[in-house]
Image (tube, rainbow, N blue to C red):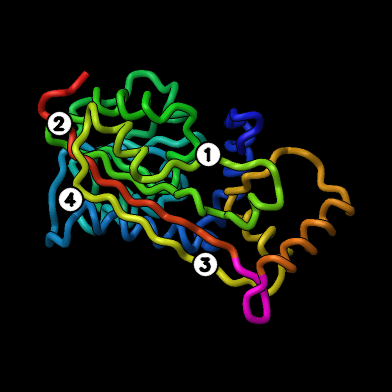
């Protein structure tokens, strides 16, 4: 949620906490992004091994499960703004046979004492909530060892364009070229990929329920009056009809970077 250019992290935490248990049932796009990102990290290898991995924004564990089912990891660190995420991730990690697991609660932009000498730092559909992406790249470069990976998925400028055309509030989405430029002093790009996907719904009300159930609401905390709700539904239906219903656009981005041996800064 971006209000006057600032993400309300406490509101983000509250909304994701409420939807944590049922998130994976409704977050169809984010679930598929987790699998694709895990495939890109493992590069089709039979069972690659990594010593230390940090997952940022682990949430309900879609990427955790996708990654651990494809590779061997010695020590798994998971971070999330929602502290209740810890037990969900712990169960997945233990089921996959990882013996060493640590959870780091809080906003990754302000967490202290992060692990270092990481082989991989990963994140699925999370970094769009960060306030300072250049600082994020700089900080992750400090904890990923030379030659290690930073791999994440996020969303591009066409993400939820239907919502943003009607409502004034939304997240700031960066194109791949800007992400590459911000990462350049610290990381070399290995994979930069994007696509556009559309979900079909029977009506605009279903779109709103979908957004609410996945916690990805880009709208502010303002109350929705009956008049505002009716206006939204009418404008959505008139502008974004698809077959017998309506559609919602997602614009996934995938980035895999390698930490430079010598930094440019």
Separation of disc 2 and disc 1 at Cα?
27 Å
**Which range is magenta?**
241-247
Task: Report which residue position mark 2 lands on.
Answer: 260
Task: Report which residue position mark 4 lands on.
Answer: 72
Mark 2 touches mark 3? (CB < 8 Å): no
Q: Is 138 left or right of 232, judged from the image as shown?
A: left
x, y percentage for residue 221? 73, 38
Q: Residue 172 carries which label?
A: 1
Tell me the SS state at disc 1.
loop
Separation of disc 4 and disc 3 at Cα?
34 Å
Question: Any magenta on residue 114?
Answer: no
Q: Earlier in the sequence, mark 2 or mark 1?
A: 1
Separation of disc 3 and disc 1 at Cα?
20 Å
Q: Residue 198 carries which label?
A: 3
Q: Which of 118 and 227 is in front in this view?
A: 227
Mark 3 touches mark 1? (CB < 8 Å): no
Instruction: Say which quarter of the image contains residue 147.
Output: top left
Number of residues whose C-alpha sits closer than 10 Å to that of mark 1, classed few (under 14), some (14–19) or many (20 or more): some
Separation of disc 4 and disc 1 at Cα?
35 Å
Looking at the rendered image, the quarter that the C terminus falls into is top left
């Amino acid at each position: 949620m971006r209000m006057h250019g600032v993400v309300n992290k406490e509101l983000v935490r509250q909304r994701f906490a409420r939807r944590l248990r049922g998130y994976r049932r409704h977050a169809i796009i984010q679930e598929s992004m987790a699998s694709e990102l895990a495939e890109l990290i493992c590069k089709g290898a039979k069972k690659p091994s990594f010593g230390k991995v940090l997952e940022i924004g682990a949430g309900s564990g879609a990427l955790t499960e996708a990654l651990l089912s494809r590779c061997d990891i010695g020590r798994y660190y998971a971070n999330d703004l929602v502290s209740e995420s810890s037990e969900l991730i712990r169960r997945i990690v233990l089921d996959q046979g990882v013996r060493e697991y640590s959870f780091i609660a809080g906003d990754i932009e302000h967490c202290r004492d992060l692990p270092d000498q990481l082989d991989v730092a990963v994140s699925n559909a999370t970094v769009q909530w960060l306030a300072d992406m250049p600082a994020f790249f700089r900080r992750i470069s400090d904890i990923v060892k030379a030659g290690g990976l930073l791999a994440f998925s996020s969303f591009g400028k066409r993400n939820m364009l239907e919502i943003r055309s009607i409502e004034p509030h939304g997240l700031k989405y960066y194109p791949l070229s800007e992400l590459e430029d911000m990462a350049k002093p610290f990381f070399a790009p290995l994979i930069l990929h994007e696509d556009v996907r559309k979900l079909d719904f029977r009506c605009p009300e279903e779109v709103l329920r979908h957004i609410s159930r996945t916690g990805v609401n880009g709208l502010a905390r303002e109350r929705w009056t009956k008049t505002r709700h009716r206006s939204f539904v009418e404008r959505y239906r008139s502008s974004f009809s698809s077959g017998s219903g309506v559609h919602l656009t997602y614009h996934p981005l995938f980035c895999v970077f390698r930490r430079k041996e010598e930094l440019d800064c």
